[in-house]
Image (spheres, grey):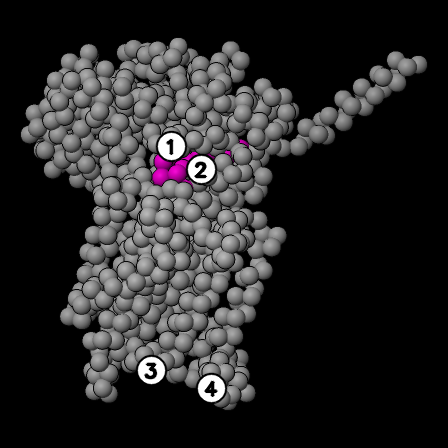
Amino acid sequence: MSAPATQPATNGRLTASPRLARLPGIAGTIDGTFLTLVIGAAILWFAPVGMGRYGTYVLSLWLVMSIAVMGLNLTLGYAGLKSLAQAAFMGLGAYTTALLTTKAGVSWYAAFALSGLLTFAVGILLGFPALRVKAHYLAFVTLAFSTLIWLILRNEQWLTGGVFGISNINRPDFFGIKLFGALEFHRFVVAVTFILAVALWWLIRSPWGRAFTALRENPIRAASLGIDTRAYTLLAFAIGSAYAGFAGALYAPLVEFIDPSPFSLSQSFFLLLMVVAGGSGYLLGPFVGALLGVVLPEWLRFAGSLYLIIFASIVMLLLIACPQGVSGLLERAWAKLTGKRGDSR
Amino acid sequence: MKTQWIIATALATALALPASAQDKVKLVDVVELSGAGATAGTNWKNGIDLAVADINAKGGILGKQIEIVHYDTQTNPGNTRAAVQRAIDEGTYAVLGPVFSGPIGASMQIAQRAEIAQLVGGEAAGLTKQGNQFLFRTSLSQTAAMPKIANYLKNTVKAGSVAVVWVNNDFGKGGRDAIIPELEKAGIKVAADVATEQGQADFAADAIKIKNSNADAVFVYLNEEESARFLRAAKQQGITKPMVGETTLLGAKVIELAGEAANGVRGHVGLSIDAPIPAFQEFGKKFQAKYNYASDHNGLKGYMAVYMVKWATEKQKKFDKKGVADTLRGATIKPSDEPGILMETTIEENGDLDRESFLAEVINGKQVINATLPKIRP
C-alpha cells in the first residue's frame, strides 16, 4: 500500500507554464495544480445548473469526501504514515459540529473551526504512538483508535444519540444568505474545499511539505539533514486529521443526519482506497480518488444490481494496471505526450 | 345530427384513450440491496416487483402501467439520501423504502420537503414521532408490538423474569428500549439485558450469559442472520427456556438458517405468509414460485406498500403526489376495496399502522399461527 520510493511527491509543476514559473513572488509559485484548482472550482461552481438536486448533492458529497481524502493523502502520500482512522476523525468532526450547532446553538463557522482544532489535537495525541511504531503496527494503533471512536459514537447515547444518530442538523448561513438549497450549499462546499485545497497546496510547497516528503522517502537521511522527524511526523498526522475533521463538519449539514455507520472502520479502508486509487502523493489525487469512490458507483447505477460488481472490477483492474493510481497514469501519459518527465522524478 | 356528433366525439376519445394509457407512472424504490440490510431489502424489493407485476397485468393504476426502478442504498445514510433525492428529481410518484431505520432517518426530510409520500419498512418507534406528515409505515411500530409481547410473556408464557438479547443497531436498540418498560409495567423482572453486535458470528458467550441468568423466558430481538446464529448457539448451550421474539425471529429466513434450533420458538408476528388469511398464503405461494424461496415479512411489506399507493391514487381518482399522502393519512383500507392490501389496515395521523397481528410458534421447521390478536383501536 505504501508509495514506491520513486514516486513523485508532487506532480503540480508538471503542467506549469514556464512563463508563470518565472514570475517573481507569490505569482511565481503558481503552477498547473493551482490553475487546475481554480478552473475546477469555477467549473464546479456552475456545474450543478440544470443538474437537479440529486446531481448537486452527489457533487457536494464528492467534494466533502475529497477533503477527508486530502488529509489522508498528506498523512499517507506525503508523510508515509498508514492511518486507518481517517473516517473516525471525520466522525469526530461531524459529531462535534452537529452537537455544537444543534444542542449548544454555536454557529457553524465556530463549530467548523472547533472540529478542526479538536481533530488536530487528537491527531497529535494519536501521533505519539506513530513516533514509536511504523508500518503495520501503526495501522493497528489507528485501527484500535477507530474502533474506540466508533464505540463511543454508538454507545454514549446521552451525548451522540447512539444508533439513532442526530437528525435535523442545520445548514449554515453566509452573511445572511440562507444555504438551505442544494445549489447554495453546494457553492458553499466548493468555496470551502477550494480554500482547504489551496492551503494544502501551499503547505506542500512550503519547507514543511518538503520535510514531510523527506520523511517519507528516507527518515534517517531526513534526520541527518536536520529535520525534526518527531515534530514533522506529529504535524503530518495532526494536519491530516484536521482535514478529516473539516470534512466531517461539512458532512453533517450536507446530509442533515449523522449516525455512526459512515465513520466505521470499513469507511476508513474506503478512504484509504480512494487515496491509493486517486494516486497517493499527488495533490489532485484525492479529487480523482473520491470521484472514483463516490461518483463512479452513482454513474454505474444504470447497470442495476450489477453496479457494485462492476465498480469493484474497475477498481481492481485500475490498481493492477497502475499501482500509482489515476494521477500516476495521467502523469505517465503526459510524459509520453510531451516527452518530458515529471520534474520531481 | 347532434347525437351523431356526440357519438363521434365519444368514439374518438375512446380511441385516443389507449394512447394515453401508454403513459406510465414512475415509482422509485430506495432500498438496502447491499450492506447490512441486504436480506431485508431484497425481500422488500421482490415484494414490490410482485405487486407491480400483478397491478400492471390487471391494467395498472387508473389505466397507467407502473414503471418501477430500484436504487441500492448500501445501507449507508449518505447514499440513501442521494438515492431518495435522485428518485424525487426523476419524478417518482411516491418513494418506496428504505427498510432500515437509520437510512430512513437520513432521507425522510427530503421526501417531506418535496411533499411526496414515503412508504418505509422501518419499525423503530422514533421515526413517526418527528411530525413528518409524509412518512408512512408498512408494518406495526415497536411501540404497537411490544405491549402485545409483554402481555404474551405474562399471560401465556407465564414468565416472572425475562432475559432480553438484542442487536445494538437502530432496530435492536429501539426494540430493547420499547420492551423493557413494557416488561416492567407487566411486573416481569429483566434478568439479563444482553447487547450483541450487528454481523456478529459467535453467540456462545451471550448464550452462556443468558443461561446463567436463569430467566423464565428469553426475548430475542436480532436481525435475521444473527437470530439464526443465536438460536443455534442457545441450543448448543442447552437453553431450554421459551424463546420469544417479534416478527423477525419467526421469519422464514431465520427458520431456514437456524434449522432444528428454530423449533419451539414463539412470539408475536406482525405479518406472515403463514397467517390464517387466504390472501397472505396466496401471496406466499406466488412469491415462492417466482423467487424460489419463502418471503419474510419484508416481502409482504413491500407488496402492501405498492397497493397503498394504488389505493390512495384510485381513491383520489387522479395522480396527485401530495394527494397520496393526504389520502393515506387517517385512512382505513379494507381488502374488500383493495384486495392487494391483504388485511384491513388503518393508517394513523402520524403514519403509524393499526391492524390485526398474530401469535405464532415454529413447529417442525414451519411457522404455525396460534392466535390472531385484534387491532389496538378496532
User: Which of the pair B246/B329 is nearer the observer?
Assistant: B329
Q: Position of residue A10 (x, y in %)?
A: 40, 77
Q: Which mark is residue B108?
A: 2
Pointers 1 and 2 in contact (C-beta within 8 Å): yes
Q: Is residue B96 magenta?
A: yes
Tell me where the magenta segment starts and ends, as one range.
B94-106
Up the image or down, A328 lies above or below A101; here it is below
- The secondary element bearing badge 3 is classed as helix
Determine the secondary structure under disc 2: helix
Distance, label 1 to label 2, CA atoms, is: 9 Å
Task: Classify B159 as above or below A117.
Answer: above
For label 1, the residue is: B127
Residue for badge 4 = A25
Task: State the residue in front, A108 or B304.
Answer: A108
What distance separates the C-alpha of mark 3 from that of mark 1? Answer: 53 Å
Give the left or right position of residue A296, taking residue B22 as reference: left
User: What mark, if any, has residue A207 been given in the picture?
Assistant: 3
| CA–CA distance in space, label 4 to label 1 | 58 Å
Circle 1 — which element?
A: helix
Q: Chain of mark 4?
A: A
Q: Which residue, as the protein is rendered here, is positioned at the far right?
A: B1
Residue type at mark 1: give it: Leu
